[in-house]
Image (tube, rainbow, N blue to C red):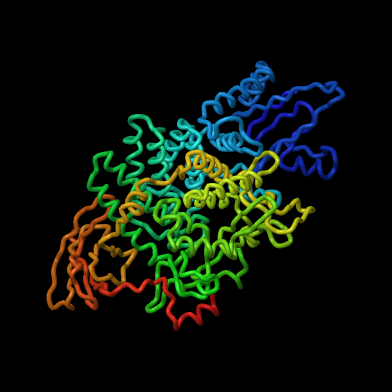
């Protein structure tokens, strides 16, 4: 029996062909009683009945697709002429040829539970056949059994973050051609201003319209990693430089604050995103040099230095009730707001928590923690044994670590609501966040960076144990007592997306990292500049989208603008004043350094702007005071009681 169909049309040869109601028909009536000639406005599931008596139990099904019925029928008939045996042999041979050309991640035979080959296949099957290089996040829809046709996206969309992570896994396995296709796809789908959409259909059309700065930073790092792995051909570095240049320009004009974190939720400073941005700027600086743009390289390194020097001011808190509770000096928070009120630490500001009830949807920034802080090590900005990192890891483990029969997992952050409810019912906009195998892989990389290879290997084994019987790793694992009637078992996959391509990519990178006894995707530029040379920026920057309130003595104040200007400024309340023209730094930035390094504490720098292109003055003064830095992370004594009550 041959069944020929197109996306919205079907012919009936034997039995019945139905729309997405077909399976419901079978479930309700134990036979097919409904018939349709068209299926529109929803997901289509074709259902057919085979007359086993007439065929004596021997039949062949050929399924052909096309833009119209005739094309679909021709494809089905051609397949029948080739025969099933040839189709099977060609299919298997293609996969065997592809997998054997990949570099081995482990010498010798794979041990029981080794997911290397399965993970490679998972990554490869998620690449589009019609948009080469386009890797979707998953073929699954989280809790899809509870979703209707109105859930158009699911995870079968492209997120540049997930795709870059997947490409990193392919690189770890030596799949160089596949990674070049990913880079070509990224180049084709980059937005004119340099960023990538939050997510998109395979044709590049945006789906959601959020902005996540890590999704612009990570493609830069992929280009650099591919270069270092010798996955790029002779002219590829020059080919992809325009893409990198535009992405770096977007970062410097709009960063470091991100409108959304990597979990697609909140705006502010987050460790993973800021670390990715800084690493990307240094990588872009090296690529700029290779492409003979030395001035751009210098500027990118300078802004990376400014941001790296500011990380603790933005995201490290001390003196809180949690410091006393967990006996630590301080810790990096999950997220911190951009703005602070007069005399109020940014860590006293409330942060919105998604996927929970309205009564529970805010937390003080000082009362939110995430494994994301360990990205400061993964991206080479902090050493694994830095006391600030060690203290942060202690708080992370106290609040987010969960031991399951399959191994150790971590939550995304405390009070996360993205997961099943307590009774196991599916996530429906609210719920309880569960353990993420992906985070087990990330923690294993941290342990390896800290020189604890045996711990990393145990976490690798846990990651393998989290997989289902077919070797697929889920987005989350159930981390509560078994609920058999809902098919939820402690330490086993939950109803979240499975497989999660990112998790399989993390597994492959971890395999490679353990084989090489070093972090596979650790950027060497950050390690050299910040861990070895210990570079500290001599300046801080002021921008309209990132206004600086105070400047420590001895620092240079850099003014960065999006258009040429004359900076009219004073350090003595306009008794005397100076004019300083900006110069074009490239990438859409016009800047000037004010010689403020010799000004005494207590001075006030006031300035305004004349815009020559528009021919008018700004009409407003701005002020930055010279003051010894009392780290904003320190919660003042008078605010601790309030912090403890409302956190």
What quarter of the picture does the N terminus occupy?
top right
**Would residue 365 be visible to someone looking at this image?**
no
Q: Nearer the viewer, residue 214 or 200?
A: 214
State the image quarter where residue 470 is shown: top right
Number of disc labels:
0
Q: Nearer the viewer, residue 220 or 588?
A: 220
Q: Nearer the viewer, residue 600 or 63?
A: 600
Q: Is residue 433 left or right of residue 276?
A: right
Residue 567 drawn above or below residue 527: below
x 52%, y 44%: residue: 158
- Residue farthest along the top direction in this orientation: 81
What quarter of the picture does the C terminus occupy?
bottom right
**Would residue 474 be visible to someone looking at this image?**
yes
State the image quarter where residue 307 is shown: bottom left
- Residue farthest along the bottom direction in this orientation: 638
Residue 294 drawn above or below residue 124: below
Point out residue 468 in the picture as x, y percentages from the top left corner.
Answer: 68, 43
x 33%, y 46%: residue: 284
Q: Is residue 616 left or right of residue 148?
A: left
Point out residue 64 in the picture as x, y percentages from the top left corner.
Answer: 65, 27
Q: Is residue 447 left or right of residue 591?
A: right
State the image quarter where residue 561 is shown: bottom left
Q: Is residue 265 left or right of residue 406?
A: left
Point out residue 46 in the picture as x, y percentages from the top left corner.
Answer: 71, 36
Point out residue 491 in the picture as x, y percentages from the top left corner.
Answer: 68, 52
x 37%, y 78%: residue: 342
């Amino acid at each position: 029996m041959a069944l020929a169909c197109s996306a919205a049309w079907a012919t009936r040869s034997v039995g019945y062909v139905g729309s997405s109601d077909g399976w419901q028909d079978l479930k309700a009536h134990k036979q097919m009683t409904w018939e349709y000639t068209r299926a529109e406005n929803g997901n289509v599931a074709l259902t057919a009945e085979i007359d086993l008596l007439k065929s004596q139990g021997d039949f062949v099904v050929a399924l052909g697709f096309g833009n119209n019925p005739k094309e679909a029928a021709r494809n089905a008939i051609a397949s029948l002429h080739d025969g099933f045996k040839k189709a099977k042999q060609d299919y298997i041979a293609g996969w065997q040829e592809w997998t054997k050309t990949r570099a081995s991640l482990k010498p010798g035979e794979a041990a029981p539970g080794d997911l290397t080959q399965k993970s490679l296949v998972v990554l490869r099957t998620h690449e589009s056949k019609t948009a080469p290089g386009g890797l979707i996040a998953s073929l699954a829809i989280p809790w899809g059994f509870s979703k209707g046709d109105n859930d158009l996206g699911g995870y079968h969309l492209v997120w540049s973050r997930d795709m870059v992570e997947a490409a990193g896994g392919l690189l770890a396995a030596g799949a160089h051609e596949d990674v070049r296709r990913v880079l070509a796809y990224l180049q084709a789908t980059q937005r004119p201003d340099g960023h990538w959409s939050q997510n998109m259909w395979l044709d590049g059309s945006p789906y959601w319209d959020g902005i996540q700065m890590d999704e612009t930073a990570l493609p830069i790092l992929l280009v650099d990693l591919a270069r270092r792995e010798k996955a790029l051909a002779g002219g590829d570095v020059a080919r992809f430089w325009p893409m990198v240049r535009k992405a770096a320009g977007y970062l410097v004009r709009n960063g470091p604050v991100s409108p959304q974190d990597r979990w697609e939720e909140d705006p502010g400073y987050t460790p993973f995103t800021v670390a990715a941005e800084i690493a990307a700027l240094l990588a872009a600086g090296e690529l700029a040099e290779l492409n003979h743009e030395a001035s751009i390289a210098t500027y990118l390194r300078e802004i990376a230095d400014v941001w790296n020097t500011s990380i603790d001011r933005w995201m490290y808190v001390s003196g809180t009730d949690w410091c006393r509770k967990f006996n630590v000096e301080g810790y990096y928070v999950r997220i911190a707001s951009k703005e602070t009120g007069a005399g109020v630490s940014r860590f006293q500001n409330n942060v919105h928590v998604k996927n929970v009830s309205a009564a529970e949807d805010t937390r003080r920034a000082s009362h939110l923690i995430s494994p994301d802080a360990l990205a400061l090590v993964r991206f080479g900005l902090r050493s694994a044994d830095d006391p600030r990192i060690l203290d942060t890891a202690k708080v992370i483990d106290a609040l987010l670590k969960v031991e399951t029969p399959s191994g150790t997992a971590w939550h995304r952050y405390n009070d996360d609501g993205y997961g099943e409810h307590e009774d196991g019912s599916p996530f429906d906009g609210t719920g309880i966040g569960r353990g993420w195998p992906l985070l087990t892989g990330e923690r294993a990389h941290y342990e390896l960076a800290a020189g604890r290879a045996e711990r990393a290997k145990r976490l690798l084994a846990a990651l393998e144990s989290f997989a289902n019987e077919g070797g697929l790793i889920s987005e989350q694992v159930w981390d509560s007592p078994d609920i058999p009637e809902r098919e939820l078992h402690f330490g086993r996959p939950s109803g979240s997306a499975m497989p999660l391509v990112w998790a399989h990519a993390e597994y492959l990178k971890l395999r490679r990292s353990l084989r090489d006894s070093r972090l596979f995707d650790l950027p060497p530029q950050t390690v050299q500049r910040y861990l070895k040379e210990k570079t500290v920026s001599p300046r801080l920057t002021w921008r309209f989208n990132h206004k600086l309130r105070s400047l420590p003595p001895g620092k240079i104040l850099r003014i960065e603008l999006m258009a040429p200007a004359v900076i009219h400024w004073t350090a003595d309340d306009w008794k005397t004043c100076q004019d300083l023209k900006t110069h074009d730094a490239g990438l859409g930035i016009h800047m000037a350094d004010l010689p403020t390094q010799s000004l005494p504490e207590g001075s006030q720098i006031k300035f305004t702007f004349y815009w020559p292109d528009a021919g008018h003055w700004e009409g407003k003064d701005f002020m930055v005071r010279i003051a010894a830095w009392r780290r904003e992370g320190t919660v003042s004594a008078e605010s601790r009681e309030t912090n403890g009550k409302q956190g």
